[in-house]
Amino acid sequence: MRSGTVAVIGRANAGKSTLINVLVGEKVAIVSPKPQTTRDRILGVLTREDYQIVFADTPGIYKSRNLLTEDMMKTTETTSRDVDAVLYVLDGHAGVRKEDAELIKKYAGLGVPLIVAFTKTDIMPAENIPAEVKFLCEEGVEADIYPVSARKGRGLKKLEAAIAAMLPEGDKLFPDDVVSDRSEKFMIAELMREKILLKYDEEIPHGVAVVVNTFRRRENGTYEVDLDIICEKQAHKAILIGKGGKALKEAASFARQDMEKFLEAKVFLTTYVKVREDWRDSPRLIKEYGYGEE
Protein backbone atom coordinates (compact mmCIF):
# COMPACT_ATOMS: atom_id res chain seq x y z
CA MET A 1 0.00 0.00 0.00
CA ARG A 2 1.32 3.41 -0.97
CA SER A 3 0.01 6.54 0.68
CA GLY A 4 1.04 10.17 0.90
CA THR A 5 0.34 13.84 0.29
CA VAL A 6 0.99 15.57 -3.04
CA ALA A 7 1.20 19.35 -3.29
CA VAL A 8 -0.52 20.55 -6.47
CA ILE A 9 1.26 23.74 -7.48
CA GLY A 10 1.21 26.04 -10.48
CA ARG A 11 0.53 29.53 -11.71
CA ALA A 12 -2.95 31.01 -11.40
CA ASN A 13 -5.53 29.50 -13.81
CA ALA A 14 -3.37 26.50 -14.69
CA GLY A 15 -6.26 24.15 -14.00
CA LYS A 16 -5.17 22.69 -10.65
CA SER A 17 -8.60 22.53 -9.01
CA THR A 18 -10.28 21.12 -12.11
CA LEU A 19 -7.64 18.40 -12.37
CA ILE A 20 -8.04 17.44 -8.71
CA ASN A 21 -11.84 17.35 -8.95
CA VAL A 22 -11.67 15.01 -11.94
CA LEU A 23 -9.04 12.72 -10.40
CA VAL A 24 -10.88 12.50 -7.06
CA GLY A 25 -14.20 12.02 -8.84
CA GLU A 26 -16.06 14.63 -6.79
CA LYS A 27 -16.05 18.40 -6.47
CA VAL A 28 -13.71 19.25 -3.62
CA ALA A 29 -12.56 22.66 -4.89
CA ILE A 30 -14.36 25.45 -6.75
CA VAL A 31 -13.21 26.49 -10.20
CA SER A 32 -13.41 29.64 -12.30
CA PRO A 33 -11.30 31.29 -15.02
CA LYS A 34 -10.20 34.02 -12.59
CA PRO A 35 -7.01 34.15 -10.49
CA GLN A 36 -7.22 33.60 -6.72
CA THR A 37 -10.17 31.21 -7.00
CA THR A 38 -8.45 28.89 -4.51
CA ARG A 39 -7.54 30.90 -1.41
CA ASP A 40 -6.34 28.25 1.01
CA ARG A 41 -5.07 24.69 1.05
CA ILE A 42 -7.79 22.14 0.34
CA LEU A 43 -7.22 18.38 0.48
CA GLY A 44 -8.78 16.03 -2.06
CA VAL A 45 -8.47 12.32 -1.31
CA LEU A 46 -8.26 9.63 -4.00
CA THR A 47 -8.40 6.07 -2.63
CA ARG A 48 -7.68 2.99 -4.73
CA GLU A 49 -7.08 -0.62 -3.75
CA ASP A 50 -3.29 -0.26 -3.73
CA TYR A 51 -2.79 3.41 -2.89
CA GLN A 52 -4.23 6.58 -1.45
CA ILE A 53 -3.26 9.97 -2.92
CA VAL A 54 -4.00 13.04 -0.82
CA PHE A 55 -3.90 16.04 -3.14
CA ALA A 56 -3.20 19.40 -1.49
CA ASP A 57 -4.76 22.03 -3.78
CA THR A 58 -2.92 25.32 -3.24
CA PRO A 59 -3.56 28.94 -4.29
CA GLY A 60 -2.19 29.71 -7.74
CA ILE A 61 1.18 31.44 -7.80
CA TYR A 62 0.29 35.09 -8.20
CA LYS A 63 1.89 38.47 -7.56
CA SER A 64 0.98 39.72 -4.08
CA ARG A 65 -1.22 42.83 -4.04
CA ASN A 66 -2.56 42.73 -0.49
CA LEU A 67 -2.18 40.90 2.81
CA LEU A 68 -4.63 38.17 1.80
CA THR A 69 -2.63 37.37 -1.34
CA GLU A 70 0.59 37.31 0.69
CA ASP A 71 -1.01 34.79 3.05
CA MET A 72 -2.12 32.72 0.06
CA MET A 73 1.42 32.57 -1.31
CA LYS A 74 2.72 31.60 2.13
CA THR A 75 0.21 28.74 2.14
CA THR A 76 1.56 27.49 -1.19
CA GLU A 77 5.17 27.68 0.01
CA THR A 78 4.43 26.01 3.35
CA THR A 79 2.46 23.19 1.74
CA SER A 80 5.19 22.45 -0.79
CA ARG A 81 7.66 21.81 2.03
CA ASP A 82 5.49 19.37 3.97
CA VAL A 83 4.50 16.74 1.39
CA ASP A 84 5.72 13.47 -0.08
CA ALA A 85 5.67 14.69 -3.70
CA VAL A 86 4.88 17.70 -5.89
CA LEU A 87 2.63 17.82 -8.94
CA TYR A 88 3.38 20.97 -10.91
CA VAL A 89 0.45 21.89 -13.14
CA LEU A 90 1.39 23.73 -16.32
CA ASP A 91 -1.19 25.47 -18.52
CA GLY A 92 -0.39 24.15 -21.99
CA HIS A 93 -3.00 26.36 -23.64
CA ALA A 94 -1.41 29.53 -22.24
CA GLY A 95 2.02 28.42 -23.44
CA VAL A 96 5.18 27.63 -21.52
CA ARG A 97 7.24 30.54 -20.21
CA LYS A 98 10.74 30.78 -18.82
CA GLU A 99 9.04 31.59 -15.50
CA ASP A 100 7.44 28.13 -15.55
CA ALA A 101 10.81 26.44 -15.97
CA GLU A 102 12.27 28.43 -13.08
CA LEU A 103 9.34 27.57 -10.82
CA ILE A 104 9.51 23.87 -11.67
CA LYS A 105 13.25 23.83 -10.92
CA LYS A 106 12.61 25.68 -7.67
CA TYR A 107 10.11 23.09 -6.42
CA ALA A 108 12.18 20.20 -7.78
CA GLY A 109 14.97 21.46 -5.53
CA LEU A 110 12.92 20.83 -2.38
CA GLY A 111 14.13 17.25 -2.19
CA VAL A 112 10.84 15.46 -2.91
CA PRO A 113 9.79 13.73 -6.18
CA LEU A 114 8.18 16.04 -8.75
CA ILE A 115 6.32 15.48 -11.99
CA VAL A 116 4.61 17.91 -14.37
CA ALA A 117 1.03 17.76 -15.63
CA PHE A 118 0.80 19.61 -18.96
CA THR A 119 -2.88 20.56 -18.94
CA LYS A 120 -5.59 21.80 -21.31
CA THR A 121 -4.23 19.81 -24.25
CA ASP A 122 -7.75 19.58 -25.65
CA ILE A 123 -7.77 23.30 -26.50
CA MET A 124 -4.26 23.61 -27.96
CA PRO A 125 -2.68 22.29 -31.18
CA ALA A 126 -1.26 18.82 -30.49
CA GLU A 127 1.80 19.62 -32.60
CA ASN A 128 2.80 22.32 -30.09
CA ILE A 129 3.32 19.85 -27.25
CA PRO A 130 6.73 18.43 -28.32
CA ALA A 131 8.14 21.94 -28.80
CA GLU A 132 6.92 23.05 -25.36
CA VAL A 133 8.43 19.96 -23.71
CA LYS A 134 11.69 20.53 -25.57
CA PHE A 135 11.78 24.13 -24.32
CA LEU A 136 11.45 22.97 -20.72
CA CYS A 137 14.28 20.48 -21.20
CA GLU A 138 16.50 23.14 -22.74
CA GLU A 139 15.78 25.36 -19.73
CA GLY A 140 17.13 22.67 -17.43
CA VAL A 141 13.90 21.04 -16.25
CA GLU A 142 14.53 17.44 -15.25
CA ALA A 143 11.09 15.96 -14.61
CA ASP A 144 8.66 13.60 -16.28
CA ILE A 145 5.97 15.55 -18.14
CA TYR A 146 2.45 14.17 -18.68
CA PRO A 147 0.17 15.86 -21.25
CA VAL A 148 -3.42 15.66 -19.98
CA SER A 149 -6.91 17.02 -20.51
CA ALA A 150 -9.07 17.01 -17.38
CA ARG A 151 -12.15 17.99 -19.39
CA LYS A 152 -11.74 15.14 -21.89
CA GLY A 153 -10.20 12.64 -19.46
CA ARG A 154 -7.10 12.21 -21.57
CA GLY A 155 -3.85 10.99 -20.05
CA LEU A 156 -5.25 10.88 -16.51
CA LYS A 157 -4.66 7.17 -15.88
CA LYS A 158 -0.97 7.49 -16.73
CA LEU A 159 -0.68 10.61 -14.60
CA GLU A 160 -2.42 8.96 -11.65
CA ALA A 161 -0.17 5.90 -11.87
CA ALA A 162 2.94 8.10 -11.97
CA ILE A 163 1.79 10.05 -8.91
CA ALA A 164 1.05 6.86 -6.97
CA ALA A 165 4.50 5.49 -7.83
CA MET A 166 6.14 8.52 -6.17
CA LEU A 167 4.47 7.91 -2.82
CA PRO A 168 6.07 6.01 0.06
CA GLU A 169 4.69 2.76 1.40
CA GLY A 170 2.40 3.25 4.37
CA ASP A 171 -1.10 3.14 5.79
CA LYS A 172 -3.97 5.25 4.50
CA LEU A 173 -4.17 8.78 5.87
CA PHE A 174 -7.97 8.95 5.59
CA PRO A 175 -10.86 6.44 5.69
CA ASP A 176 -12.02 5.12 2.32
CA ASP A 177 -15.21 7.24 2.25
CA VAL A 178 -13.46 10.59 2.81
CA VAL A 179 -12.82 12.76 -0.27
CA SER A 180 -11.86 16.06 1.40
CA ASP A 181 -10.69 17.49 4.71
CA ARG A 182 -13.10 20.40 4.39
CA SER A 183 -16.53 20.56 6.01
CA GLU A 184 -19.89 20.84 4.26
CA LYS A 185 -20.23 24.36 5.67
CA PHE A 186 -16.92 25.36 4.06
CA MET A 187 -18.01 23.97 0.69
CA ILE A 188 -21.34 25.83 0.88
CA ALA A 189 -19.46 29.13 1.27
CA GLU A 190 -17.12 28.22 -1.56
CA LEU A 191 -19.98 27.35 -3.92
CA MET A 192 -21.50 30.79 -3.32
CA ARG A 193 -18.12 32.43 -3.97
CA GLU A 194 -17.66 30.38 -7.14
CA LYS A 195 -20.90 31.71 -8.61
CA ILE A 196 -19.84 35.28 -7.79
CA LEU A 197 -16.52 34.68 -9.53
CA LEU A 198 -18.32 33.37 -12.60
CA LYS A 199 -21.07 36.02 -12.76
CA TYR A 200 -19.43 39.36 -12.06
CA ASP A 201 -16.71 41.40 -13.74
CA GLU A 202 -13.01 41.23 -12.89
CA GLU A 203 -12.86 43.89 -10.18
CA ILE A 204 -15.65 42.63 -7.94
CA PRO A 205 -14.96 38.94 -7.15
CA HIS A 206 -11.41 39.30 -5.82
CA GLY A 207 -12.65 41.52 -2.99
CA VAL A 208 -15.42 39.15 -1.93
CA ALA A 209 -15.58 36.77 1.03
CA VAL A 210 -18.50 34.56 1.99
CA VAL A 211 -19.35 33.94 5.64
CA VAL A 212 -21.94 31.29 6.52
CA ASN A 213 -23.90 32.36 9.62
CA THR A 214 -26.40 29.51 9.69
CA PHE A 215 -25.95 26.00 8.31
CA ARG A 216 -28.63 23.76 9.76
CA ARG A 217 -30.22 20.49 8.69
CA ARG A 218 -33.91 20.44 9.54
CA GLU A 219 -35.80 17.38 10.78
CA ASN A 220 -37.36 16.90 7.33
CA GLY A 221 -33.89 16.63 5.75
CA THR A 222 -33.80 20.07 4.12
CA TYR A 223 -31.07 22.61 4.90
CA GLU A 224 -31.31 26.20 6.09
CA VAL A 225 -28.40 28.36 4.94
CA ASP A 226 -27.92 32.02 5.89
CA LEU A 227 -24.80 33.73 4.63
CA ASP A 228 -23.11 37.12 4.22
CA ILE A 229 -21.32 38.21 1.06
CA ILE A 230 -18.56 40.60 2.12
CA CYS A 231 -17.26 43.21 -0.34
CA GLU A 232 -14.89 46.15 0.01
CA LYS A 233 -16.82 49.11 -1.42
CA GLN A 234 -20.37 50.48 -1.41
CA ALA A 235 -20.21 50.66 -5.19
CA HIS A 236 -19.37 46.94 -5.29
CA LYS A 237 -22.35 46.21 -3.03
CA ALA A 238 -24.66 47.95 -5.48
CA ILE A 239 -23.24 45.91 -8.37
CA LEU A 240 -23.52 42.64 -6.45
CA ILE A 241 -27.17 43.31 -5.62
CA GLY A 242 -28.07 44.70 -9.04
CA LYS A 243 -31.16 46.62 -10.06
CA GLY A 244 -34.08 45.44 -7.98
CA GLY A 245 -31.86 42.73 -6.49
CA LYS A 246 -31.81 40.85 -9.81
CA ALA A 247 -28.07 40.13 -9.98
CA LEU A 248 -27.88 38.75 -6.45
CA LYS A 249 -30.99 36.64 -6.95
CA GLU A 250 -29.48 35.07 -10.08
CA ALA A 251 -26.12 34.34 -8.42
CA ALA A 252 -27.85 32.91 -5.33
CA SER A 253 -30.14 30.75 -7.47
CA PHE A 254 -27.18 29.23 -9.32
CA ALA A 255 -25.35 28.67 -6.03
CA ARG A 256 -28.39 27.07 -4.42
CA GLN A 257 -28.68 24.57 -7.26
CA ASP A 258 -25.08 23.44 -6.73
CA MET A 259 -25.56 23.38 -2.95
CA GLU A 260 -28.55 21.05 -3.38
CA LYS A 261 -26.55 18.82 -5.69
CA PHE A 262 -23.65 18.75 -3.23
CA LEU A 263 -25.83 18.09 -0.14
CA GLU A 264 -28.34 15.90 -2.02
CA ALA A 265 -31.18 17.79 -0.33
CA LYS A 266 -33.31 20.89 -0.76
CA VAL A 267 -31.69 24.13 0.42
CA PHE A 268 -33.39 27.30 1.66
CA LEU A 269 -30.82 30.03 1.05
CA THR A 270 -30.79 33.57 2.45
CA THR A 271 -28.08 36.02 1.37
CA TYR A 272 -26.99 39.46 2.57
CA VAL A 273 -24.32 41.79 1.17
CA LYS A 274 -22.13 43.73 3.61
CA VAL A 275 -19.27 46.19 3.15
CA ARG A 276 -15.96 45.86 5.03
CA GLU A 277 -13.52 48.28 3.43
CA ASP A 278 -10.08 46.87 2.63
CA TRP A 279 -10.74 43.65 4.55
CA ARG A 280 -8.05 41.87 2.52
CA ASP A 281 -5.44 44.02 4.29
CA SER A 282 -6.84 43.43 7.77
CA PRO A 283 -5.24 40.52 9.66
CA ARG A 284 -8.24 40.38 12.00
CA LEU A 285 -10.84 40.20 9.23
CA ILE A 286 -8.79 37.76 7.14
CA LYS A 287 -8.73 35.43 10.13
CA GLU A 288 -12.39 36.09 10.95
CA TYR A 289 -13.41 35.13 7.42
CA GLY A 290 -11.46 31.87 7.63
CA TYR A 291 -8.41 32.54 5.51
CA GLY A 292 -4.71 32.13 6.21
CA GLU A 293 -5.19 29.17 8.54
CA GLU A 294 -4.34 25.52 8.02
Image: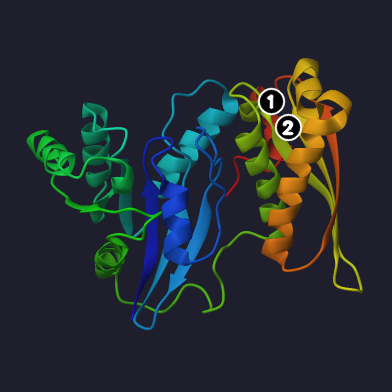
Q: Give the colour scheme shown.
A: rainbow
Q: Is residue 278 above or below residue 257?
A: above
Instruction: Specify whether 215 is left or right of 58.
Output: right
Image quadrant containing the N terminus: bottom left
Amino acid type, label 2 = Leu
274, 168: nearer the viewer: 274
Image spot of residue 209 (x, y percent): 70, 36
Q: Secondary structure at mark 2?
A: helix
Image spot of residue 189 (x, y percent): 71, 48
221, 228: nearer the viewer: 221
Q: Is residue 33 visible?
A: yes
Amino acid type, label 1 = Ser
Residue density around tag 2, few if under 14, some if 14–19, many if 20 or more, within 10 Å: some
**Residue sitting at x 86%, y 31%:** 245
Residue density around tag 1, few if under 14, some if 14–19, many if 20 or more, within 10 Å: some
Q: What residue is pinned by disc 1? A: 282
Task: Find out whether the residues at labels 2 and 1 contact each other: C-beta distance under 8 Å.
Answer: yes
The quadrant where residue 12 appears: top left
Q: Is residue 92 above or below residue 215?
A: above
127, 148: nearer the viewer: 127
Q: What residue is pinned by disc 2? A: 285
